[in-house]
Image (spheres, grey):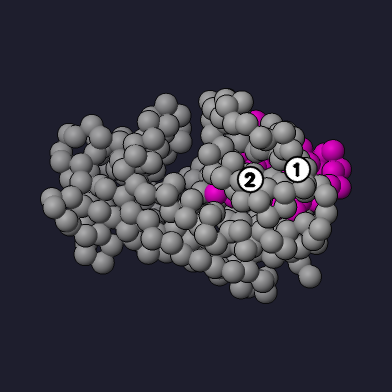
């Protein structure tokens, strides 16, 4: 039965709708902004080591909101530098939205945007084919390692691009809350190579096995999933699609799987009920990997 489930990424229109609803119902962007403005500045201090020009790569940058938040902090730490920003994003609509956002923002003249409408693996192929020798001072991979065939190989490639004092930032769900759901139902929900059930716990295991130096942070994040428990609720079904990454999960999942997922989402270890609302723990983990010494 599990093989009949189709991944949400196969329907881009529904994916985008469910993703936007997820952002509305969650504190995800606020959580990321807290990290970018309160923790990341100290990390960015050593990036570049006094250079007048920095190379940045954003992998899976989406519509660019978080990229520009990062640049605001980078510019404050290194006000005199110019930046080459390689934007890697396969979705044409998201890339268009990013370009529109840039056009509306003043004071970005110090950044040269290089647009790459491609996946991370296509970017790797492109980079190797052109025999590029350029190194990066800062690379960020925000909520995108779920969408690559081999997260470890992807990390290895981009880590290899870091220059001296370079940093690689990875943001993913932590291994608790929503991450627990993914771990428990990994085989039923993630039965294709299209998407990976990967949390910061998995990434730390990979990095520890390689002896790589990194810093790890976890920030509170939550999502209101109340409508998920109302049979036939359109928004609830969209949220369940995004939480499980299964297209039309409510309509296509076997009854036992659906009941198990809904039961776990409501367990007090992972969610709280307050004023009639069900709030799921969706903590984010941030990992900052150093350049190989």
As drawn, is 283 to the left or to the right of 162?
A: left
Quarter of the image with the N terminus is top left
Which of the 4 image quarters holds residue 151? bottom right
Where is residue 211? Give x, y as percent: 67, 74
169 or 12, nearer to the observer: 169
- As measured in the structure, the alpha-carbon distance from the residue carrying label 2 to the one carrying label 1 is 9 Å
Look at 59% across and 31% down and name the residue there.
105
- Residue 193 or residue 279, whichever sits in front: 279
Task: Determine if residue 33 is in view.
Answer: yes
Q: Residue at x 53, y 39 (%)?
A: 65
Q: Tell me if 252 is positioned left or right of 44 in this view.
A: left
Give how far across and how far down residue 254 sits, in percent: 25, 44
State the extent of the magenta-drawn residues as a range: 117-142
Question: Disc 2 designates what residue?
Answer: 71
Question: Could you classify mark 2 by the number of other residues whose Cα lies within 10 Å: few (under 14), some (14-19), or many (20 or more)?
Answer: some
Marks 2 and 1, the one that precedes in the sequence: 2
- Residue identifier under label 1: 83
Name the residue nearer the viewer: 51 or 160: 51
Residue 193 covered by magenta stretch: no
Q: Are marks 2 and 1 in contact (CB under 8 Å)?
A: yes
Quick check: 254 left or right of 48?
left
**Image location (x, y in percent) of residue 241:** 33, 40
The answer to which of 216 and 254 lies nearer the viewer is: 216
Residue 23 location in percent, x, y? 38, 41
- The residue sitting at 47% across, 55% down in the picture is 34
Is 138 magenta? The answer is yes
Q: Is 85 situated above or below 203?
A: above
How many C-alpha atoms fall within 10 Å of the one at disc 1: few (<14), some, or many (≥20)?
Answer: many
Which quarter of the figure is the C terminus placed in?
Answer: bottom right
Q: Secondary structure at mark 2?
A: helix
Q: Residue 281 occupies which quadrant of the picture?
A: bottom left
Residue at 69% x, 65% y: name it.
Answer: 290
């Amino acid at each position: 039965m599990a093989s009949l489930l189709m991944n949400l990424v196969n329907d881009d229109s529904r994916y985008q709708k469910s993703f936007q609803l997820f952002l509305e119902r969650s504190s995800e962007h606020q959580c990321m902004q807290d990290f970018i403005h309160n923790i990341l500045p100290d990390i960015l201090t050593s990036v570049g080591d006094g250079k007048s020009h920095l190379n940045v790569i954003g992998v899976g940058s989406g519509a660019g909101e978080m990229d520009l938040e990062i640049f605001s902090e980078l510019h404050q730490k290194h006000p005199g530098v110019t930046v080459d920003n390689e934007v890697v994003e396969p979705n044409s609509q998201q890339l268009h939205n990013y370009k529109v956002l840039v056009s509306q923002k003043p004071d970005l003249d110090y950044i040269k945007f290089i647009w790459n409408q491609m996946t991370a693996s296509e970017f790797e192929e492109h980079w190797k084919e052109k025999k590029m020798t350029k190194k990066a001072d800062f690379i960020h991979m925000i909520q995108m390692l779920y969408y690559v065939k081999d997260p470890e190989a992807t990390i290895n490639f981009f880590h290899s691009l870091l220059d001296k004092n370079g940093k690689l930032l990875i943001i993913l769900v932590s291994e608790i809350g929503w991450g627990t759901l993914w771990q428990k139902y990994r085989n039923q929900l993630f039965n294709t190579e299209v998407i990976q059930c990967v949390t910061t716990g998995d990434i730390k295991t990979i990095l520890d096995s390689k002896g790589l130096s990194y810093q790890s942070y976890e920030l509170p994040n939550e999502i209101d999933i109340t409508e998920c428990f109302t049979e036939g609720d359109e928004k609830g079904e969209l949220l369940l699609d995004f939480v499980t990454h299964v297209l039309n999960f409510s309509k296509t999942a076997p009854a036992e799987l659906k009941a198990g997922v809904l039961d776990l989402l409501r367990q007090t270890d992972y969610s709280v009920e307050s004023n009639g609302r069900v709030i799921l723990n969706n903590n984010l983990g941030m990992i900052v990997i150093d350049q190989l010494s």
